[in-house]
Each structure stands twice: as structure tokens, then as C-alpha cells.
Image (cartoon, coloured by chain):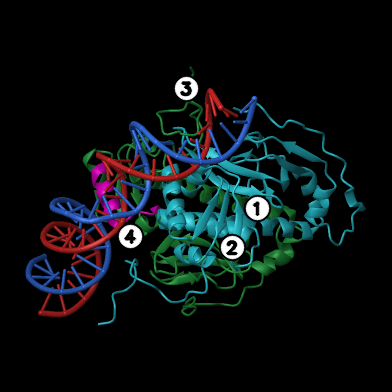
Chain colours: A cyan, B green, C red, D blue
Amino acid sequence: MYASRLASMPGVAMLPALGLPPEAPSLDALFAAQPTESLAPGAALFWEGDAADYFYRVSEGCLRLYRILPDGRRAIMGFVFGGEMVGLSCLDMHRYTAEAVTAVRVRRLSRSRLHAMGEGAGELQRLLFTRLFEEMMAAHRHIIVLGQMGAEERVAHFLASAACRTRADRKRPVVLDLPMTRLDIADYLGLTIETVCRILSKFKRDGLIALEGRHRVILRSLRTLQEIAGEPDGFDAGDIREGRARHLAVEAH
Amino acid sequence: MYASRLASMPGVAMLPALGLPPEAPSLDALFAAQPTESLAPGAALFWEGDAADYFYRVSEGCLRLYRILPDGRRAIMGFVFGGEMVGLSCLDMHRYTAEAVTAVRVRRLSRSRLHAMGEGAGELQRLLFTRLFEEMMAAHRHIIVLGQMGAEERVAHFLASAACRTRADRKRPVVLDLPMTRLDIADYLGLTIETVCRILSKFKRDGLIALEGRHRVILRSLRTLQEIAGEPDGFDAGDIREGRARHLAVEAH
DNA sequence: CGTTATTTTGACCCATGTCAATACGGGTGG
DNA sequence: CCACCCGTATTGACATGGGTCAAAATAACG
């Protein structure tokens, strides 16, 4: 289970060390100095249990992050797209497997090396902390989706938040390319393939989306999807709606 | 909604600054230098949306961490018991409300001040990172529980992991004091009160637990509960069991 | 084009949620 | 110390969302 590592596994390239402008050692700049590695679809970037010696920045493609439970079920913790980072949220070893959904291009950064040069640079620490908090927020959102939302809400939320990641403006037809399979989506949302399909079909019938092939979804009404999802995220709704709130005090008497 | 803060809100006591042994500025030591504050049951330590100026160490009692969704549902993200910390996992403002379940005693530490002195002390940074990772791991566990496990598994997992937190040895009768209500448990596990009750009753019928009053649970067979929960946590089971694994390749042919 | 994996749809069933009644427990005032 | 009360918990009857099983349709790939 710990076999089949990276296709290419070049030694860590020399960092330009302190040759970078010390005032802005942006992570991006550090990554840019690293060689690019490639992963074929289905290949693993790292396995759950591997030593977490590096973290990564995906420049192109899509990864799925998952754990396999003892009885074989698979829980997908998240997806990573081009421009995003993976591998920070663990101390000593990876807590999940990262596997290429599509062909992927990544650059890696040595954790220990970064740590060493980071000692001085509070700036870097700050960046890492921030990234970590973002992951934490994502985890919290996921917990809420899985713990409180019904199937329809979950799928709507999935589509809506995918749309956000593309920075698509809230205006008309957002074209999404979802590279993962229905099973991936199901394992991510804690549903079954069939349920995901049925709900996508329903959204289609209702004119909320259009499906083109297996991986292209056109959101005809992101607004409506967001409503179904119960607001993309927290805020903007200070008013309590309908009634599913057993913990609220009884109405005025 | 942003009202009713702490009962007592003393200014941040002077830190012994660098008077502490610089080689071991343990967080506990820092906390110990802070005055203790008290919270009555139901009182909030902080609210979702509050500026995250401090973090806290609970010396006694139990807190629930939750978010209220726009439609009034409540998602409990976790519970905090004596000896544990809260309030780290956010950058600028708290992502959930922390509310006392029982009477609580806490000490607070100024985030900015700690940050200032932390610049030099890589040791401290390291401690915070570690705590953060632990929270991350807890979040991941929670995601798996909510996404993949059935009601019975969820409750078993809840009991088993509560038992672990008390550091009770795996040997016979573990006596748990669960200060939260059934509703709290339900909102934490993504279930309803009724389901939680029914499953507890079933466990009782099956001789796995005994209930004493509303808050005391005696685990007669932690082992069995852990099995129901599908292993307390990941490992130790390299073998794949029964069949709920659609993503596994078809059996040999 | 044919072959195979993925997706979609349908029929059916079960685990949980919902609604409603009852029982318990823990505090209060007599 | 006992009787009463109210919030919490438990139990039951029933409804239903979503899972399961099975078949058909569609896409991807050689």
C-alpha cells in the first residue's frame, strides 16, 4: 500500500536560498524555483501514512484527497485544483492520500528546508498559518454540509462552491468543468452515485443546470443553487427562516 | 447577538515577558500566569464573528462549539473539556460560538502579545502548529464520521472517543460523565435526539452500556463499541472487510 | 465500430426523521 | 422530607429521504 510513488522523483533542487528578495519570500516565488513534476491520472502524489517531507503546489490538473476506512469505504476530504496547495495540514505524516484525477503538474517544496529558512522569516510563517486556517475553514464548511444538509442541499452546495473557486462572477451561465467522477462526488458528499445522479437530473429538469457530456455542467442559475444550498457560506442572513431549530427558545407567549 | 460577553473581563495581566526560562515557554506556564475567569452554564465565552483577540485554556468544565445556520439549524463542531484549549483555529475572527455547557473556568492569553513574543521563540510557534494540527485531525475524523458512518456507528464513535479523552485504560467499565444534553450530542453527530436516545437504549439492551441518570454512562464493553465504530481511528486494520466499497476494483477473475 | 466503464433511470426497502404521547429527574416551595 | 412542576429524555407509530439492487443508456477508448 506504500508502493508506487511518484513517477519522477528528482532530488530537491537547490533553493535560491536567500537570494530572493527577503522582504517578500512569497510562497509562489519559492515554488516557481522548483522543477515541475507530472502525474498521470490515477497516480498518487503521496499516500496516507507517508512522511510529510514536502508540500506541493498544483499548477495544473485536479487531485482528490481521501482516506480509506478499515471496511473499504472511501471518504474524500477534498479536491485540489490548479493554483492551490496541498500537504500542509499535517505535522509528521500525511493524513490522507492525494491522487491525480486528471493529468497533474506539481511543484514540491521541502518542508524541513522551508522550516529552517522560515525560522527567521516571520513573513513565511504567517503565510503558512493563513493557508492552514483556510484549510480549517474548508473543513468546518464540510462538517456542516455533511452533518446538517440533505442530499439536494449538498449537491447544490458542491456546485455553487465549485463555481466560486473558478472566480466566476455571479452573473449568468457559469460553465463548470468537473473532472472527477460521480463516485468521487458521492464519496465527497457522503452520498451514493445514484443519489448524485438523480439530483443532478432533477436540477436539469428544473432548468437550474445543463449537462454536457460527463464532466461539463452549466449553471443556469447560480443564485438559485446558492439558495438551495442555504447561502454559500454563513453570513448575510441574520434572519432565522423556517422551523428546523429545536434548540431555539419557544416562541413568545 | 454580539452582546453578553464575559462576566469578568480583566485587562491582560502583564506577562512575565522574557522572565520565563526561554528554553521552555510552555503554553501551560503562560496560561498559569493568567487570572482565572468563570462562566455560568449557557454563557458564551465568545461568539462567532467576534474578533479573535485571545485564545483560551479551559481548566474546568465543558464548552460546546457551534455555528447556527441561516435557517436556524445548529451544527456543533466539537466540545472542549478541562485541560484543553480553544480559539486557535481562526485567523482574524472566531468561526464558531463557544458556550459553557457546565460551569466553566478558563484562562485567556492575548493572541497579539503571544504573537509578538513568539516571533523569536520558534518553540512557541511549534507548539501552536501542533495544536492546530490536532484540531485539524479532529476535524477530519469528524468529517469521516458524518460523511460515512451510520447512526449507530456515530454514537459508538462518540462514546468511544469520549472514553479516550478521559485516558481511561481500555479495561473494563469506563465511567463517563457526559455533561451535554442529548440535543447537543445529536447536533454534534448530525442526528436527531430521538435517534440518539434509541441507539443508547439499544446499546443498553445489548449490555454494552449502562445509563445512570442523564449524564452518566458506563461503558461495559469499550472494545465492542470501538468495533461498532469501525476502529477508533484508522490503522491496525490493513484488511478490507465486507463489501461497502464501490471504488475497489472488481474481485479477481 | 465493438467493448467496457461510467452514468442514468426505475422499483423497492430500510434507516432515520417526524410527530406525538409518556416517563423521568432535578429543582422548588411547602 | 415530600409533593409538584418543568425541562429533558424515552418510547412508539408512522412518513420519507436516500440507499440498494437491477437494468438500460451513454461515453470513452481502442
Q: Position of residue A187 (x, y in %)?
A: 49, 43
So how many labels did they put on this image? 4
Q: Which residue is mark 4?
A: B183
Of the residues shown, which amino acid type is indicated by label 1?
A: Phe
Secondary structure under tag 3 reads loop
Which subunit holds the residue at mark 1?
B
Tell me the residue that label 3 is attached to: B251
Instruction: Please determine if labels 3 and 4 lie on a single subunit.
Output: yes
| Residue at image location 55% in from the left, 54% down from the top | A139
First in sequence, mark 1 or 4: give its number: 1
Q: Chain of mark 2?
A: A
Query: Which subunit holds the residue at mark 4?
Result: B
Contact between marks 1 and 2 (CB within 8 A): the answer is no
Mark 1: secondary structure:
helix
- Looking at the rendered structure, whether the residues under marks 1 and 2 are on a common chain is answered as no
Quarter placement of the C terminus of chain A = bottom left
Marks 3/4: CA–CA distance: 43 Å
Q: From this view, report whether residue B107 is shown above or below residue A46.
A: below
Q: Which mark is residue B129?
A: 1
Magenta-highlighted stretch: main secondary structure?
A: helix
| Residues shaded magenta | B189-203
Label drawn at residue A173: 2
Give the distance between the C-alpha atoms of the residues marked 2 and 3, in whole angstroms.
Answer: 43 Å
| Front-most of residues A80 and C4 | C4
Quote the CA–CA distance across marks 1 and 2.
42 Å
Residue B45, image x, y percentages:
49, 70
Few, some or many C-alpha atoms within 10 Å of disc 3 (few <14, some 14-19, many ≥20)? few
User: What is the three-letter code of the residue carrying label 3?
Assistant: Glu
